Amino acid sequence: MRRFIVLACAVVLILGLESGCRQQQEEGVPTDLQTAIDAFYAAVEAGDVEAHIEMFTEDARMMPNHWTMYEGKEAIAAMMRAGEGWVFRIRDREVVDIDVSGDIAYTVNSYFYTWHSEDAEPQWHKTKNVHIWKKDDQGEWKLHVDIWNSDVPMSEFGNE
């Protein structure tokens, strides 16, 4: 009986650890889209700018908080590569909404982000985003529109 209990506890522990390491599959989301979403956030977490850039369509648009709109993958790439020496990370991401219709999908997320120089301590800011995903000519999901904005009211930025 003792062996059974030890074995049962080991199985529960292994299954629990395994499920904790996997990315959560959202209900009704195609596996290939979930894989693309997971790859996007893995590239962000790793600070892998080139992998991050590859997640965009050729005619993507990025609309960062308090910045100008970037149009096209090359413009987005130039902006991202110019951030050398800076760290961009996301934590505590929650999927607020997600839907798929044919070759188009969107996600709405809430999270904290930091954008700080490599020698500085992270300053975490509450924000949210909308991502519009689109299948490319090869049938791969790519990020087509990336929009985000802060949860901090403008008055707290000194722009009353």
Image: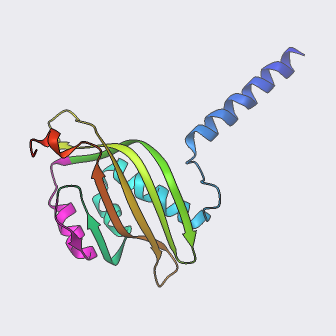
Q: Is residue 127 above or below residue 137?
A: above
Name the side, left or right, on which 106 lies relative to 45.
Answer: right
Whole-percent x, y for residue 43 in the image? 37, 55
| Residue that lies at the very extreme toward the right in this rendered image | 1
Whole-percent x, y for residue 31 in the image? 61, 63
Q: Which of 100 and 136 lies nearest the eye of the viewer?
A: 100
Q: Count the marks.
A: 0
| Residue that lies at the very extreme toward the top in this rendered image | 2
Residue lying at 16% horizontally and 39% vertically, measured from the top left: 156
Residue lying at 35% horizontally and 52% vertically, measured from the top left: 44
- For the N terminus, which image quadrant? top right
Per the image, is 2 magenta? no
Q: Is residue 92 above or below residue 58?
A: above
Whole-percent x, y for residue 22 in the image? 58, 46
Whole-percent x, y for residue 121 in the image? 19, 32
Per the image, is 75 magenta? yes
| Residue that lies at the very extreme toward the bottom in this rendered image | 137
Name the image quarter holding residue 74: bottom left
Q: Is residue 49 above or below residue 3?
A: below
Residue lying at 80% horizontally and 26% vertically, measured from the top left: 8
Q: Which of 70 and 33 lies nearest the eye of the viewer?
A: 70
The stretch of residues the image draws in magenta is: 67-86
- For the C terminus, which image quadrant? top left
Residue lying at 62% horizontally and 34% vertically, measured from the top left: 17
Q: Is residue 35 above or below residue 46?
A: below
Name the image quarter holding residue 84: bottom left
